[in-house]
Amino acid sequence: MNQTSLAQNQARDAQTTSCCIVGGGPAGAMLALLLARRGVPVTLLEMHRDFDRDFRGDTVHPSILEVLDQIGLASKLLEIPHSKVTGPTLQFANGPFRPFDLGRLKTRFPYIAMIPQVRFLEFITREAAKYPEFKLVMHAQVQRLTEENGIVVGVGYLGDDGLEHELRAKLTVGTDGRFSVVRRRAGFEPIKTAPPMDVLWFRLPKLPGEPEVIGGAFGGIGGGRIFIVLERNDHWQAGLVFPKGQYQLVRAQGVEAIRKSMVETEPRFAKHAESLTDWQQFTLLSVESSRCPLWHKPGVLIIGDAAHVMSPVGGVGINYAVQDAVVAANVLAGPLKSGTIAEAHLAEVQRQREWPTRVIQRMQSTMQDRLMVRALQSTRPANVPWQFKLLFKIPFLRDIPSRLIAFGPRRVRLQEA
């Protein structure tokens, strides 16, 4: 059989949908839910067999909760056991410093809800499944984009049966993260910056007589290290920040060196540190930041981490990815439903979302360079830079970081038909 006949047979056997979303993370799941609610046929392809991955971002920001509240789901989501973070308290040699405090914001949800991402994704896809237009395919590994006359008309993926399947769609959206297959196959090249740090994540047990943590998170900075702790329902999620490129050195020094470093930075957790006995308890996050100059071409769009990878500073990656999904739903639902989707609509999604992405990445870079890098490069006790202390004494200015982390430069709202 020649190639033309093979392509024709594949087209006849292909599944069809209006929108194919590749990647079942927060952006993909939210976009699928919002499109299905508007009556747009959508198929969500997730490469794994389930949503359970260790140390994925578990943050649900005020912006996400406000959008879910618009469609009557926020209260239901918050029935899932969770903890609340209003902002970290960082301990410096010259005293404590809170870089942001969401508790001062005017919103029904002045906090970040710490919900395991597996529970969040199960919740969103379960709600989406209530609409007949929604279809979820697990263990679907996208191999290629299907193009006709320079337009992407779908994808080919390996299914759970080990066979290749064809899914044809008016629009393919890549929400498949920092290692996006859709981005690579579409030929989009990100501009990368390398934040000068990496993070080791690990869990610590909760013990009797736990220390009080203001705002649900805190960190110790100084002596060439940064120790971060987030309060969870049944454990502490902890991270040790170290200079980029030193992972092998940190590992060679062993678990005992990490315990010692943690105790020196935050003595209140000396007893907790005794639970660290094996390197398998640690997960490395290689910190990256990047942004694609172009997010679209005919028939395909990328959003979320596929379009812009965020530094973990402020924990805003999921927030901005979901905001991308909300804007995409606002712009694309009507054209998809009417069959009039054009590249101009895809360009509009990028136009609305690229500037907020640039703003938050610039803020993250400032925080990294002025606070974190200096602390990691010096073995002496670290002090809060005077510029930051002055900024946070001015009422009009002190809540700008909080607003950027909670909502971005502008609030994103769901536009109903």
Image: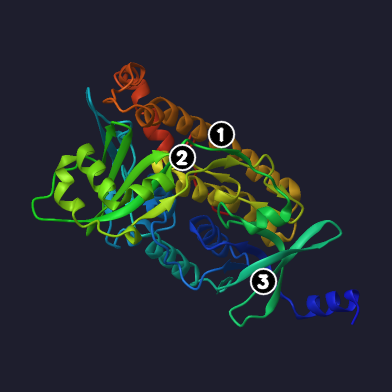
Between 71 and 185, the residue placed more toward the observer is: 185
Q: Is residue 61 visible?
A: no
Q: CA distance from mark 2 to mark 1?
A: 23 Å
Q: Residues within 10 Å of mark 1 (few under 14, many from 20)?
A: few
Q: Give percent across and percent down for residue 340.
A: 75, 56
Q: Give percent across and percent down for residue 50.
A: 46, 71
Which secondary structure, mark 3?
A: strand
Which secondary structure, mark 2?
A: loop
Residue depicted at x 43% and y 34%:
404
Q: Give percent across and percent down for residue 53.
A: 42, 63
Which mark is in front, 2 or 1? 2
Residue identified by numbered label 1: 358
Residue type at mark 3: give it.
Tyr
Residue type at mark 2: give it.
Lys
Between 416 and 224, the residue placed more toward the observer is: 224
Position of 144 compared to 232: left or right?
A: right
Which mark is in front, 1 or 3? 3
Q: CA distance from mark 1 to mark 3?
A: 33 Å
Residue depicted at x 89% and y 82%:
1
Q: CA distance from mark 2 to mark 3?
A: 35 Å
Q: Residues within 10 Å of mark 3 (few under 14, many from 20)?
A: many
Residue identified by numbered label 3: 157
Residue identified by numbered label 2: 244
Q: Residues within 10 Å of mark 2 (few under 14, many from 20)?
A: some
